[in-house]
Amino acid sequence: MIIAIDGGYTETFVREEYPSACIAFFTFGPLLFNLADLRALDSKRFIAPEDLQKLKQIERYTLVLPTRGIRNCEEPTLAATIRRAIYDFFERRRGPDHEQLLTSLKWFLFRRWRTQPDEAMTIEIQHCPNKCGYGPISFSHSDSSMKTCPSCGLPVYLTDSFRLHERVDEEIGASGIIAYVMTMLEQLVLVNLIHNILALKPSLLRNILFVKDGPLAFFGLVAPLYRPMRDLVEHLITQTNAPTAPTLRVVGLEKSGAFVEHAAAIQDQIRPGSFFLAGDSYIRKFVIPGGGGDTIYGQNTYYGQKVFFRAPSSEMYVATIPARNYKSEPIPDDIPHLSEILALIAELRCSMYDNALIPVALANKLVSLSDFPSQRILAQFAREIGKT
């Protein structure tokens, strides 16, 4: 089974004249299909619409954030409006079981997958996000996910630990956080899937390949989330002894950036069907020139190792795949399921764009805001809501 995770966003004007006002629309989610359904298409002379529909089972998540000149009438500032919108998104109940992403978030942040979780573990917000100067404010797993600041009496949310409010400027706006929000939400949806599968049937993880669009990493303000994510994936991929024990197969695939450009430059030097792991020394010398001081590349952002892979059909891929431990100079034996994951990447290729994979291309198409719905409709909708 393949689960691909991708997302898209667009920022549009609600009011173009001065003072301008903007809103960002996000749509993202996991696309699920059985590899057997894809393989069955090869044996068909004609492909019917219902055959393709089996490959388009996606669960969409949507989020709307004001980015300039707009605030919730119940909130004092733009930053407070954004904080509340993000918290409400995680708290919202979805589906027939009324699940909350907030439940998976707490499971993730407090490492509740461990056999003996640390009950004394806390998540600290160093300063009250309402800027009253009070702090730190701590959350434990047993606490409510919303507290009241003892100083100013305003709400403080567990989701404030993302620190996105620190990059919001009441005059300039919040456009600077959009990319961080998108990559964070995509990966927390991955966490939610893993949490639900472990709760339902842990052995099912052994039959799933998770494919994420982009590297397995958190950047910018949300970069500290790499710590619980690295703990989680390293915990799961090391559980390979018992046939029914959960394990994890996950890969991040890049479509642009310095690593993709470097891969194109060296493609002719790599034999089809082969790969190599890019360690810190190689990356610093050929891809991201410059010394890294005492830290290795990606040490404080990534939870997977860089792999350059040229498929048997000659397509070149830049993949990020977790190892048992994040290393400066990894070797193939450090990465469980490496050969299996690369073989599946080769099988899932398509020609929609250079070095594309079917699940990523389908997920991207199904969450594209240019198609679902169009940017013009979104802008008109936002204007109409603003009038009410």
Image: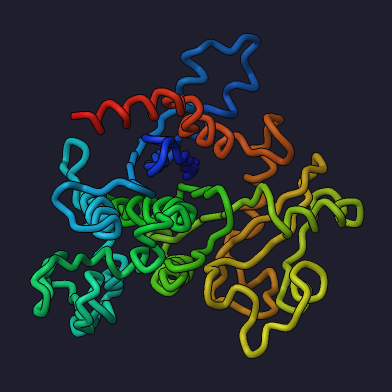
Specify whether residue 240 is in view. no
- Tell whether 48 sits left or right of 295: left
Nearest to the observer: residue 192 or residue 174: 174
- Tell whether 360 sits left or right of 150: right
Nearest to the observer: residue 62 or residue 97: 62
Specify whether residue 336 is in view. yes
Give residue 304's position: percent from left, percent from top. 57, 66
Residue furthest to the front in view is 18
- Tell whether 75 sits left or right of 183: left
On screen, residue 72 above or below 249: above
Nearest to the observer: residue 90 or residue 332: 90
Residue at horizontal 57%, vertical 77%? 299
Give residue 173's position: percent from left, percent from top. 40, 55
Residue at horizontal 53%, vertical 10%? 48
On screen, residue 162 above or below 264: below
Q: In which quadrant of the rendered view does residue 372 lie?
A: top left
Give residue 99's position: percent from left, percent from top. 19, 47
Residue at horizontal 33%, vertical 64%? 165
On screen, residue 285 above or below 342: below
Give residue 360's position: percent from left, percent from top. 56, 39
